Amino acid sequence: MDITSQFTKESSEKVKIQLDLKASASEEETLSDHYVILRSLGKGNFAEVKLDYHLHTEVQVAVKVLQNGAKNDFSIKTKIDMYKTLDHPYVIKLFHIINTKEYTYTVLEHAAGGDLVSYMGSVGRLQEEQAQHIFTQLVCAAHYCHDNGIAHRDIKLDNILLDAKGNIKLCDFGLATLVTARQGTKDFC
């Protein structure tokens, strides 16, 4: 049975934000043209993620802030081009890209439930039914990526987010690479 057949049509709010926030890039716009920063959600080695509010749709989004630099520019562009092709209910959606001289801002779907690490810390352990639910969704997300020639290469609890309904959202494709059946991958992580 195809798990994705269980989904109904997206809510009008989600469709509205996807139409408004097309995955495009522009040098002429700034983050403040579209968003109000609410707070920081976390900081890693390569980026900071902030919770923002989209002015037009009044929806909260996550904005990943990446510093541009000669070494990073090609890698960032490659990852974003890869991310733009993904559209699956269990993969974080890329809505919008804003490039400035110093930074690349990737505007992503906000998963209000946080990451699986934090969730596990608060509940201790999962009931079998909940673990099956999460694992089934994770397998669907990975299968979708593989069908589209993308290997995530960094699936861990930190990179599995939960939405407000308890569904997973696979995120952080920073180590992802394109893979072909004939070639495989030449990159190591």
Image (spheres, helix red, strand yellow):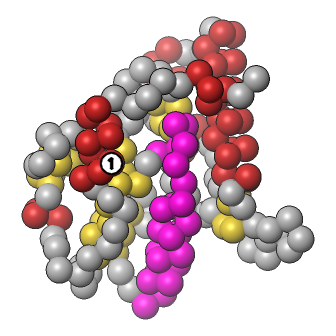
Please tell me whether the stretch drawn in magenta is mainly helix, strand or loop: helix
Residue at image x 55%, y 15%? Answer: 124
Q: Is residue 51 left or right of residue 29?
A: right
Q: Would residue 31 be seen by someone viewing this image from the given angle?
A: yes
Q: Is residue 60 left or right of residue 130?
A: left
Picture quadrant where residue 130 is located: top right
Q: Would residue 103 be seen by someone viewing this image from the given angle?
A: no
Q: Is residue 108 left or right of residue 130?
A: left
For residue 90: magenta? yes
Provide residue 178's location: percent of width, then percent of height: 69, 68
Q: Mark 1 points at which residue?
A: 18
Q: Viewer-proximal residue, 153 or 77? A: 77
Provide residue 73's location: percent of width, then percent of height: 44, 83
Q: Is residue 2 left or right of residue 88?
A: right
The amino acid pointed to by label 1 is Gln
Tell me which segment is drawn in magenta: 70-92
Q: Vertical placement of 176 versus 74: above or below?
A: above
